[in-house]
Image (cartoon, rainbow, N blue to C red):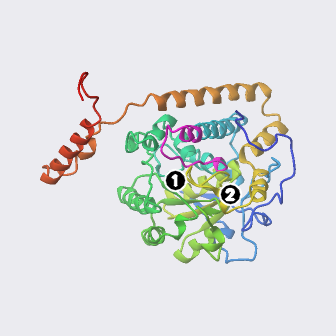
Amino acid sequence: MTVESTAARKPRRSAGGKAGATGTETAAEATGTATKATGARRTTRTPRAAVRKSTAEPQLVQLLTPEGERVANAEYDPYVADVTPEELRGLYRDMVLTRRFDAEATSLQRQGELGLWASLLGQEAAQIGSGRALRDDDYVFPTYREHGVAWCRGVDPANLLGMFRGVNNGGWDPNGNNFHLYTIVIGSQTLHATGYAMGVAKDGADSAVIAYFGDGASSQGDVAESFTFSAVYNAPVVFFCQNNQWAISEPTEKQTRVPLYQRAQGYGFPGVRVDGNDVLGCLAVTKWALERARNGEGPTLVEAYTYRMGAHTTSDDPTRYRHDDERAAWEAKDPILRLRRHLEAANHTDEGFFAELEAESEALGRRVREAVRSMPDPDHFAIFENVYADGHALVDEERAQFAAYQASFTDAPEGGN
């Protein structure tokens, strides 16, 4: 199984090769930030483009083109200036292994081992770039698709699958990795993140909070309420929106008349659009936004402009509402292929690295497959526990009915009717 992309490994020009509201706009002015010392603490300066009024061409931060070329950016370069070739290889490894795990999970669902799966295919750069920008003491509130961020936070990939197999309600301790349990209710985690961030500020902690959501969730009232509260209370939270162009079958242009990042202006805090298939750009922008939060400068909206290469979930059929040529155009901007081109052009790696990573990814796939198939079934009666603190007659009755139902499947004794 390829661990890289369904796109050819040969360098090729992208279809359009640029990003914007339609996937073909000019990546106009890359924006960023500058910093200055003020006593014992640094203060970030909000980039001009982050607060600039709407223009015909949405602003896009891009540090790595689809062809793997490094783009200079005076405002954001300082946030990735210390990234070493070894760390670049690490980002590549993160994306490859995350994609391999995701592909294995999709296969397991197709084989009946999982009830459902939400693939991140195509969104690896947005998740790995932002995930590696976090400090250990930062706190993450994900949706149900942040498998790459979970990887960055040290959550075992096998633990992510327990909920989708129906054997647990999460699978990990949120406090162990500062990574909250997956949130199925669309948009509600932004409220949780805002409240948590307000608590962090009251505690005087030097940490930040990040909330992940999609373009579809941006239409939810919960998200609007989160923007209001976070702005008014200057909460140290970063809203990281992965605009993958489709809210299930609803395209972005049917959800908003302005680019999503520009919505932040109406709430009084900056918004930035970054090329979501550029792992270096996502790393830099997220570092800047987190630094603003830690410095007491309030919330930021980051719109990672990317594309969902697969189905919304394994119960979805994207061929019913989008065309193959659309996927092909975005496939040319593949985040993994993009970084590989850059690594090869800069002589930061060799074929031995890729071969070792291929073997590692296959080993990860086998481990995840074996872990899922060996997961013990949950206690059938656990559903009745912890409903009422002191018990309840109706729950007792339902438990007895369920016990009788389960007993009906017991094999009849030998010689019986």
Which residue is rendered at x = 62% and y = 55% of the image?
Answer: 317
Residue 281 got which mark? Answer: none
Q: Amino acid at mark 2?
A: Thr
Is residue 33 rendered to the left or right of residue 405?
A: right
Residue in front for this viewpoint, 106 or 301? 106
- Work out whether 324 lies above or below 403: below
Kindly state the secondary structure of the residue where label 1 is placed. Answer: loop
Q: Which mark is residue 40?
A: 1
Mark 2 neighbour class, 10 Å CA radius: few under 14, some 14 to 19, many 20 or more: few
As drawn, the residue found furthest toward the top would be: 414
Dot 2: what SS? helix
**Residue 119 drawn above or below residue 162:** below
Q: Residue at x 67, y 25 (%)?
A: 359
Displayed quadrant of residue 355 = top right
Magenta stretch encompasses residue 115: yes
Q: Nearer the viewer, residue 243 or 262?
A: 243
- Amino acid type of disc 1? Ala
Q: Main secondary structure of the magenta part?
A: loop
Residue visible at 16% across and 54% down in the picture = 394
- The magenta-colored residue range is 105-124
Q: Local crowd at mark 1 within 10 Å, few (<14), some, or many (≥20)?
A: few
The residue at 53%/74% (across/down) is 268
The quadrant of the picture occupied by the C terminus is top left
Q: How many numbered circles does the render carry? A: 2
Q: Is residue 42 visible from the viewing direction of this image?
A: no
Q: Relative to 4, is 141 above or below?
A: below
For mark 2, what is the residue? Answer: 319
Q: Position of residue 343 (x, y in %)?
A: 78, 38
Residue 392 against residue 32 in the figure, above or below? above
Point out the tag, 1 or 2, that comes first from the N-terminus: 1
Left or right of residue 107: residue 113:
left
Q: CA distance from mark 1 to mark 2?
A: 55 Å
